[in-house]
Amino acid sequence: MGWSSLSAALASHLKNILSIISKKNYKSLSLEIFQLTDSLGIDGHVLLLQTIVDQLDLHGETRSQKDTLKLQLLSSCVEKLLHKPNFPTILCQTLGHVSSVHREGYLSDLAKALKLSLENEICLGLALIEAPDPAWRREGEKFLVIKVEEVLKVKSELSDGTLHRLLVYIALHESLF
């Protein structure tokens, strides 16, 4: 079985799992999903994120219980992957292949829906600025400028790794700041 056949089968399986997810089975199904996608590495993570993101409307204020659980699963996945060196690749591949994603303001909507900390929002922006798609890079840059202003306003402390990555980016792109 080639990767495209396996990918299609896995996507179908993930959609089926997401269609039956409930409070009662959330823990066992999320464990199954993470074990399955972890065993496939980057491709598995991308497919999981694509499947969830494609089914969520981040603009809506009210969400069904199923959507709330999908969002919780997405949040767990992003939190798990956010500080891994290959997260930019996973994020860019995910957003590059999801048809339902609206670019302008999408990152802000995603960060708000996932209830990310300011540091994790910065990591999200730093990941997106590595996107091969110029529109996504611009979205990441705009998002980062806003988040840097927030860090300075609230005098938030960042981990050494995040601070280093952010300072390198600022030094290389002074004109944005």
Image: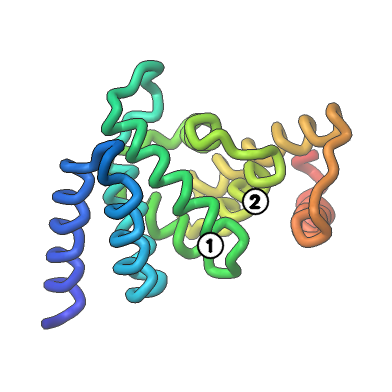
Q: Residues within 10 Å of mark 1 (few under 14, many from 20)?
A: many
Residue occupying image coordinates x 39% and y 50%: 95
Task: Please tell me whether mark 2 sits on a helix, a strand or a loop.
Answer: helix
* Left or right, residue 156 beside residue 56: right
State the residue position of label 1: 87
* Left or right, residue 87 beside residue 164: left
Name of the residue lying farthest toward the top: 61
Is residue 131 shown above or below 19?
A: below
Q: The residue under label 2 is which amino acid type?
A: Cys
For the residues labelled 2 and 1, the Cα–Cα distance comes to 9 Å
Answer whether labels 2 and 1 touch (C-beta < 8 Å): yes
Task: Please tell me whether mark 1 sits on a helix, a strand or a loop.
Answer: helix
Residue occupying image coordinates x 17% and y 42%: 20
Q: Which mark is residue 123?
A: 2
Quarter of the image containing the N terminus?
bottom left
Is residue 76 shown above or below 93?
A: above
Q: Position of residue 177 (x, y in %)?
A: 80, 39
Q: Position of residue 94 (x, y in %)?
A: 38, 55
Residue occupying image coordinates x 75% and y 41%: 176
Q: Position of residue 26 (x, y in %)?
A: 31, 45
Q: Residues within 10 Å of mark 2 (few under 14, many from 20)?
A: many
Q: Position of residue 106 (x, y in %)?
A: 47, 34
Q: The residue under label 1 is which amino acid type?
A: Phe
Front-most of residues 95 and 64: 64
